[in-house]
Image (tube, rainbow, N blue to C red):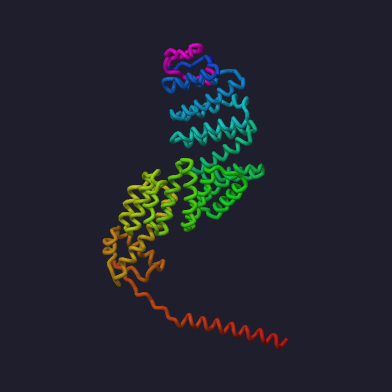
Amino acid sequence: MPAPPFSSPVRDSRPLPQAASSLRFVFFPTGAMATTHLAATTESLALAVEAKDPSEAISILYRVLEDPSSSSEALRMKEQAITNLTDLLRQENRGEDLRGLLTQLRPFFSVIPKAKTAKIVRGIIDAVAKIPGTSDLQILLCREMVQWTYAEKRTFLRQRVEARLAALLMENKEYSEALTLLSSLIKEVRRLDDKLLLVDIDLLESKLHFSLRNLPKAKAALTAARTAANAIYVPPAQQGAIDLQSGILHAEEKDYKTAYSYFFEAFESFNALEDPKAVFSLKYMLLCKIMVNQADDVGGIISSKAGLQYVGPDLDAMKAVADAHSKRSLRLFEIALRDYNAQLEEDPIVHRHLQSLYDTLLEQNLCRLIEPFSRVEIAHIAELIELPMDHVERKLSQMILDKKFAGTLDQGAGCLVIFDDPKTDAIYPATLETISNIGKVVDSLYARSAKIMA
């Protein structure tokens, strides 16, 4: 005989608490399937709360969902049971069971309002997202739900699940598919004029184009998100995400002062909500301070009342970089990159800017070292700066090509030859200026002669 749709294995057959003695149900040993349902009542939910282990509580909640009653009270109790069951499965890291629950609940969705269905579906998808290493499972779950919403003509829910799917595809670096999905979704949502969802989609599109290094389109999508957000009330978390993306784009254009103000706004929004994204906003604020040569301010920001709440590896990494920058020490810089690899190298935004900072710092140190010499061995420079010789040689040749200083590399002798700065002859600019003025005089005389002849 097939098992009921919500049945789940139970581990033991211990007697029930006295408070639930009036309810009739049976516990089965491990591997057996329950064949009786529980009434969807407050007492049944209380029984699950009092269960001695999570597996027993999960089994009870599954059996509550088997109750065939469709009264308003029973439906309300089942909704609560679904919420409790989702939390328990998430705590037990049972992602596949959450996926199965979402499939098994489809008959139940036909008897409750569509808005409640959307809330339950999104809640279960969010629960799966909180389980580590479930990226592929989330994508599969979203694809299944999109197919179901198409079949059931649940447009409102489908659009939100598709937006979630696009975000997951972007995180999985499947940019082409994510962009195709977003393009069709944006057209559909704009026709329906769902501005709240449109803000989410435009913001997601901006992030996607930024990942593809298409800054003009990323800025255009962000502008569209801001325009839509200005017409409605935007929740603080969403406003914080918009400000965070604005700061990232301004930092990419080297406008670090404006970027800092956006990161500060994002930090205030996330900090008020106790959102984990607050630490990233603070981290990027410190990055902006370092990039505008205000590394001394980093310690003050970290030791402030707001900064002390987020003390940890991320802020320690930025403090180490700030110290290296203040001392103009490449060795300390490389030590910071090695010790805080996860916080600096694996964060694409920080990594990109720190690479630029490292190049600038290296050039400044090399210029300072070669300044007293007219001819110097490359090995000696490498020893002074404490870097590999081939690395130094490569950087010096790049600086010569970029005209950072005048010189040449004598690779046969292993030396750098520095030329004196050529003095500019003032006669050439003066000659060009004289010719330009004569041209203006000739044009003026021609205009006057044309009037006289007329």
Q: Is residue 132 above or below residue 380?
A: above
Identify the residue at image location x=49%, y=49%.
Answer: 265
Q: Residue 219: where, in percent of width, then height? A: 55, 53
The residue that appears at 38% across and 47% down in the rendered structure is: 315
In the picture, measured across the screen, residue 356 lies left or right of residue 120, that is left
Q: What x and y, as percent, mark residue 201? A: 57, 44
Residue 37 horizontal side relative to residue 310, left or right:
right
Along the line of sight, the residue nearer the viewer: 60 or 384: 60
Q: How many marks?
A: 0
Location of residue 324 with respect to 434 vertically, above or below: above
Q: Is residue 290 visible?
A: yes
The residue stretch that appears in magenta: 2-29
Instruction: Identify the residue shown where x is 54% and y is 49%.
Output: 206
- The answer to whether any part of residue 211 appears in the image is no
Residue furthest right as drawn? 454
Quadrant location of the C terminus in the rendered image: bottom right
Query: Residue 202 at what x, y percent from top left?
Result: 57, 47
Residue visible at 33% across and 54% down in the picture: 323
Asked if the magenta segment contains residue 22, the reply would be yes
Please determine whether, in this image, residue 143 is positioned above or below residue 257.
above
The picture quadrant where one finds residue 276 is: top left
Across and down, in percent, residue 374 comes to 30, 72
Q: Looking at the image, which is closer to me, 203 or 241?
A: 241
Name the main secondary structure of what is drawn in magenta: loop
Q: Quadrant of residue 448?
A: bottom right
Q: Is residue 112 magenta?
A: no
| Relative horizontal placement of residue 110, taking residue 278 as reference (left or right) | right
Q: Along the line of sight, which residue is nearer the eye, 283 or 141?
A: 283
